[in-house]
């Protein structure tokens, strides 16, 4: 039996591929609904996928599967909750074709041990499971909170994780809101929280919002011969963007063409250059690479014109509580007063600082080691976790080795590769 820990997009897709390869699978997750991890948990229909439906099939061999299931065109951007429902239906369909092989355990894995060839998985309820191997489909492990001063008390005025169930219910309609962060999470929350009579402030050091999607012509990736460091990569990518602007009048074809070679580009960089990239280039990469649909962009324009959304290019330097809310002191010397502050700074990638007991235990017990720069776990090319135990992983926990590993097209490919690797290692007959 193979345990898949996590029932979000990565876990559901991996479980489906394992079932198709003849494996018995135990899917472990406390959530009531499968397929609705953090990315697809929202019920707000304005929260759209940032990848068109034609690229979101759970099957590599059938690119149109999701679009047909949802009844939409391949170029459409669909509500994320619809995609979560699709993933659940996809696993149900695969399970029905392979009856008796899927077991679902509604509990949280808290510790993993390895002894005498078996993986022992401790559960929050006090029970445990034994498996021949485990796949860690944990998604993003925790949210970033490095902007919060250490002396700030816990308060209803702070929302540390906006995607936690019920997290936004306590936000008062008659008070302004501050979003710390200006990425895709902040974009979604601005649409949910923006309304007449309220200002939603979005604060980040760059003040940059994601760029919008536009139809783009296909373009071949750049030639990487001779690239040995970050300066070379910057030079090659910049020249490639200029060529895209010359040929297509748009930078998007150049950025999109990097997708098949992003892991190779990352691998070309020595560790000091990877660290420089994170410090100097990360935000520019994110806003151009992870874009928002045109419908979303138009909504933001309307909110900004109405004065209901304001962006601030600065950091948070101080916080103090006031009756009914909170005051943030910003790096530019100004202050913002709001009823609620919402953490939209994204996910925590450094597993060495991860508070999750499962991740911390894997590191402490030597069953996993941090990836380069602490980004996720160190993994082999097939997704196996370095450490000696029969553990595999995919998605965000492979970021140190692959960098671009969180979008669903990459997760879909990794799920298929992990399923092949696990069943081959265990000798499961297909």
Image (cartoon, grey):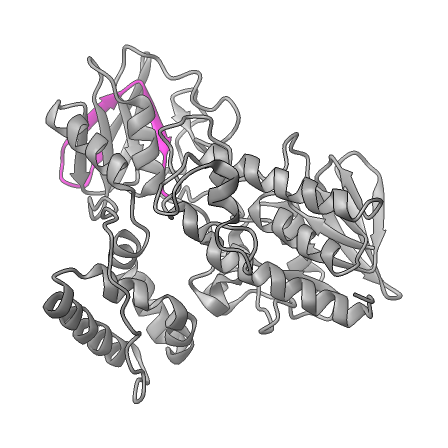
Q: Residue furthest bottom?
A: 226
Q: Is residue 232 visible?
A: yes
Q: Is 427 located above or below residue 174 in the figure?
A: below
**Quadrant of the rendering where the N terminus is positioned:** bottom right
Residue 309, horizontal then vertical, whole percent: 19, 28
Q: Is residue 256 rendered to the left or right of residue 424?
A: left
Q: Is residue 8 rendered to the left or right of residue 366?
A: left
| Residue stretch in magenta | 329-345
Q: Give 67 or 188, whichever is nearer the viewer.
A: 67
Residue 200, horizontal then vertical, whole percent: 24, 25
For residue 311, what is the image quadrant? top left
Residue 425, horizontal then vertical, whole percent: 77, 71
Q: Give 224 or 77, whichever is nearer the viewer.
A: 77
Q: Is residue 235 rendered to the left or right of residue 285?
A: left
Q: Give 35 or 226, whichever is nearer the viewer.
A: 35
Q: Is residue 349 visible?
A: no
Q: Residue furthest right?
A: 116
Q: Is 59 located above or below residue 258 in the figure?
A: above
Q: Is 59 located above or below residue 248 in the figure?
A: above
For residue 59, what is the image quadrant? bottom right
For residue 419, what is the image quadrant? bottom right
The residue sitting at 23% across, 44% down in the picture is 209
Decide whether residue 341 is among the magenta residues: yes
Residue 394, horizontal then vertical, whole percent: 58, 59
**Quadrant of the rendering where the C terminus is positioned:** bottom right
């Amino acid at each position: 039996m193979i345990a898949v820990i996590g029932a979000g997009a990565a876990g559901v897709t991996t479980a489906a591929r394992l079932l198709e390869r003849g494996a018995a699978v135990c899917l472990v997750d406390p959530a009531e609904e499968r397929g609705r991890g953090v990315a697809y948990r929202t019920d707000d229909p304005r929260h759209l996928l940032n990848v068109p439906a034609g690229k979101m099939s759970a099957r590599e061999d059938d690119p149109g599967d999701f679009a047909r299931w949802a009844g939409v065109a391949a170029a459409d951007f669909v509500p994320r909750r619809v995609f979560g429902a699709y993933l659940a239906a996809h696993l149900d369909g695969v399970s029905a074709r392979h009856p008796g092989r899927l077991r679902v355990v509604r509990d949280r894995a808290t510790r993993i041990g390895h002894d005498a060839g078996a993986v022992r998985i401790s559960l929050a309820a006090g029970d445990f499971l034994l498996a021949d191997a485990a796949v860690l489909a944990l998604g993003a492990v925790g949210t970033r909170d490095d902007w919060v001063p250490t002396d700030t008390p816990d308060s209803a005025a702070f929302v540390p994780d906006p995607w936690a169930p019920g997290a936004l219910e306590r936000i008062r309609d008659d008070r302004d809101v501050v979003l710390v962060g200006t990425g895709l999470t902040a974009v979604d929350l601005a649409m949910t929280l923006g309304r007449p009579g309220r200002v939603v402030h979005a604060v980040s050091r760059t003040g940059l919002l994601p760029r919008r999607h536009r139809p783009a012509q296909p373009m071949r990736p750049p030639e990487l011969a001779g690239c040995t460091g970050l300066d070379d990569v910057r030079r090659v990518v910049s020249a490639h963007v200029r060529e895209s602007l010359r040929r297509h009048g748009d930078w998007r074809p150049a950025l999109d063409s990097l997708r098949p070679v992003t892991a190779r580009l990352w691998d070309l960089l020595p560790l000091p250059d990877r660290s420089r990239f994170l410090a100097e280039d990360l935000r520019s990469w994110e806003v151009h690479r992870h874009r928002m649909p045109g419908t979303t962009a138009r909504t933001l324009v309307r909110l900004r014109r109405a004065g209901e959304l304001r962006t601030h290019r600065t950091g948070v330097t101080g916080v103090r509580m006031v009756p009914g809310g909170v005051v943030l002191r910003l790096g530019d010397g100004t202050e913002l007063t709001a009823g609620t502050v919402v953490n939209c700074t994204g996910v925590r990638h450094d597993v060495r600082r991860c508070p999750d007991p499962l991740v911390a235990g894997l590191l402490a017990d030597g069953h996993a080691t941090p990836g380069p720069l602490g980004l996720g776990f160190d993994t082999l090319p097939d997704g196996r976790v370095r450490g000696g135990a029969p553990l595999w992983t995919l998605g965000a926990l492979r970021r140190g080795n692959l960098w671009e590993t969180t979008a669903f097209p990459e997760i879909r490919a990794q799920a298929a590769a992990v399923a092949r690797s696990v069943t081959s290692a265990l000798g499961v007959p297909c």
